[in-house]
Image (spheres, rainbow, N blue to C red):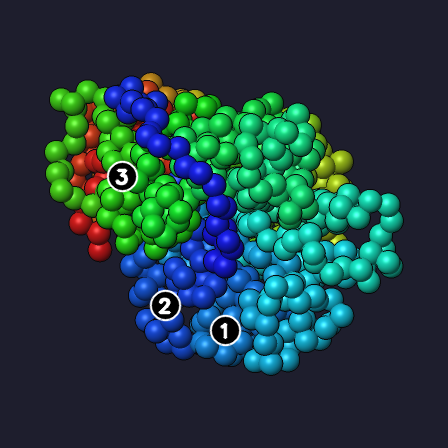
Amino acid sequence: MKKLFAILMSIALLIGSIVFSTDNKVEASENEVRAAWISTVFNIDWPSKGSRGNAEVQKREYINLINRLKGAGINTVVVQVRPESDAIYRSKINPWSRFLTGTQGKDPGYDPLDFIIRESHNRGLKVHAWFNPYRASIYSDISNTSPSNYLNIHRDWVVNFNGKWYYDPGLPQVRKYIVDTVTEVVNNYDIDGVHFDDYFYPGAGFNDSKSYAKYGSGDKSAWRRENVNTMIREVHDSVREINPNIVFGVSPAGIWRNKRNDPRGSNTGGNESYSSHYADTRYWIKNGLVDYVVPQVYWRIGHPVADYETLVKWWSEQVRGTNVDLYIGQGIYKNGQSEYGGENVAAQIKRQIQINRKYPDVKGSIYFSAKDIVNISQVYNDLKSLYLNNQGNQNSGNQGNQPSKPGVRLPYQNQMSGRNRAETAVKISQKSWKNKADSVVLVNGEELLNAVASSTLASKMDAPILLKFGGKISNSTINEIKRLKAKKLIIVGDKKSITEVDSRRITSMISGITVDRINSSNPQIVSNAIAKRLDGASTAYIASEEALVDALSISAKAGKERAPIIISSKNNISNENINYLKNNNIKNIYFIGGTSVLSDNVIKKIENSLGINLNGKRIHGSNRIETNSKVIEDFYKEKFSSKAFVTRSDAPIDAITVSVFAQKNNSPIILAGNSVSQYQRNILEPRAVSLLYKVGGNINQNSYSIIHRLLGGEMK
């Protein structure tokens, strides 16, 4: 981060400027990360110093801040949760931060991080928890620190350097303390990422002679770098073990090494993080110790010793061919030449982002800091034009087909997507069950009708639906069952579908969990077995085994009502399912799908068996998307929804796994195809949604963008 007390590099400046045409713009990826650092230290960004001790004011300030950030196109916030050896979250390890109340250790009266995550996610913003790993106190005088602070409990762990206190990176106890601090947050909060800045060793003169004498050997610089490497590796592995969907990233200083000192370095001449902070970022990238890296390229285009594009190009070459994502740290706090020795990075921000977009390995930007986005009108307007206006042009499609709702507020957006369908199910589970779930439903992802029928049982049990694909059950799925502290595993499918080996693997890794199996892979039998587990149902939905997607369109509504989804063949419904309807006196029955998949013979058989008239109870359209639209029209009468979920029409498993989340909010699932028909437009256009989730990958972007705009409107 910006070094508040650092001496700025004194160098000669180039006269003139580099011409960079913005006429030939490089379009942004739809997944471009557009993030802002929110500093809590010194109350830089949030909360304000004047709000200390006032929870309600702090909440209003945060909501106002993220609404403004969202308005500029920001989609991720990187919030400083550990500014010193403290916490802005409820912790058993670290005391409450002084920047909340004015007194370290004093309870602010609410859990700020829980509030931050909830309000941010409601607006479609991801949240990365930002830690300063080694910083112990920003003040030399530590008499006002909390007695419970590890700085006081273990004074032998800290060193005073240039008027500040730091934990000694050479101590194994310190590494464990840092890992424990991070994992406490990973275990207890629904964060999307863990983030470290550039505070490692504070300088070459750091007095670590005692730890070196006890634990060190050989070249001291190499030993220091290995201490930091080990800490990074242990944090990465711990986060991955707890929740592999939480990413871990680091933001080092912008120059790793200069080429004159290492031929692998950049063609620059500035301060090297390799030797000043002992941060070997290139090693972390090449060895997969981080998921993303954010070099602080806080210099202007054309800088004589640290040219912006030279560094962007160098960093993009380092991540190429690895699994590490690259975002650029943008120094927009440099706003005005007099204060920053000739640097006015804020004035160049549009040109810098266009440079970033020239390099495919650059996946986005993080801005230091949030207050500079909202307070510098030029920066705010530049980002808005780059992100929102550009996005609008990018996704506009046929202008004659645009929804006619000018001037309305569009839904906030969020995404739940993993590397595959099983991991998307894990993502959904993590989003909807933030703490625990007593039960989990496990389904073979290739037996889609069984999964559809299971959605109502999962809703009744308040259980996520997790998936098995291919060979053995994935570690991420098992880790999610562990995280949920589930006591019961309900397996849907016979022993060929989900084997005894699968079952034993789970029970051996999760002590105390019991297994309950619905032992069939025949969807009609499975749907009957699930129906019998639903007490007091007054409604039933009949769906054809030939039309899976029709069935999934009703899954969230069926789950809300605890109503069974009965699977039938095209021309006949089993006697067992007829008997279920009769024995439970269910007369409110809907048929999902047209006659091409569910014939009138099925309806007549049920009418004759139950002695009722079911005329008009068929819900269908000309195709799966129109049937889905008809379900929304008939069963979601309220025109406003707090949430809605968009999934691919040809990837129905995502809609199934999200159905339990959707029913919790009485929210529709919307199928997106390769285009948006006039019928689908007519159904969606009168509606409004506050938060729109994109579920799963490879959704047609043009269709999604049209649906997003159609759902704009007045938010309740």
Query: Which residue is painted at 71% across and 75% down in the image?
Result: 153
Q: Are marks 2 and 3 in contact (CB under 8 Å)?
A: no
**Earlier residue among tags 1 and 2:** 2
Mark 1 touches mark 2? (CB < 8 Å): no
Q: Amino acid at mark 1?
A: Arg
What is the x, y in percent for residue 603? 33, 30
- One can see residue 644 in this view: no
Task: Name the residue tied to disc 2.
Answer: 48
Disc 3, SS: helix
Determine whether 346 is above or below 485 in the image.
Answer: above
Q: Is residue 161 left or right of residue 246?
A: right
Tell me: residue 144, above or below residue 280: below
> As rendered, which of 362 and 396 lies closer to the eye?
362
Callout 1: SS: helix
Residue 409 spot, x, y in % from top left: 20, 45
Q: Which mark is residue 176?
A: none
Residue that mark 3 sits on:
382
Residue drawn at 27 percent across, 30 percent down: 390
The residue that label 1 is drawn on is 98
Q: Nearer the viewer, residue 438 or 169?
A: 169
Name the residue rendered at 45%, 72% in the picture: 100
* Amino acid type at mark 2: Ser
Of helix, strand and loop, which one carries label 2?
A: loop
**Mark 3 nearby-residue class (10 Å; few <14, some 14–19, many ≥20):** some
Q: CA distance from mark 3 to mark 1?
A: 35 Å
Q: Earlier in the sequence, mark 2 or mark 3?
A: 2
Task: Give how far across and how far down residue 209 sits, in percent.
Answer: 80, 60
Regarding residue 231, the answer to whether it shows in the image is yes
Alpha-carbon span between mark 2 and mark 3: 25 Å
Disc 3 residue type (three-letter): Asp
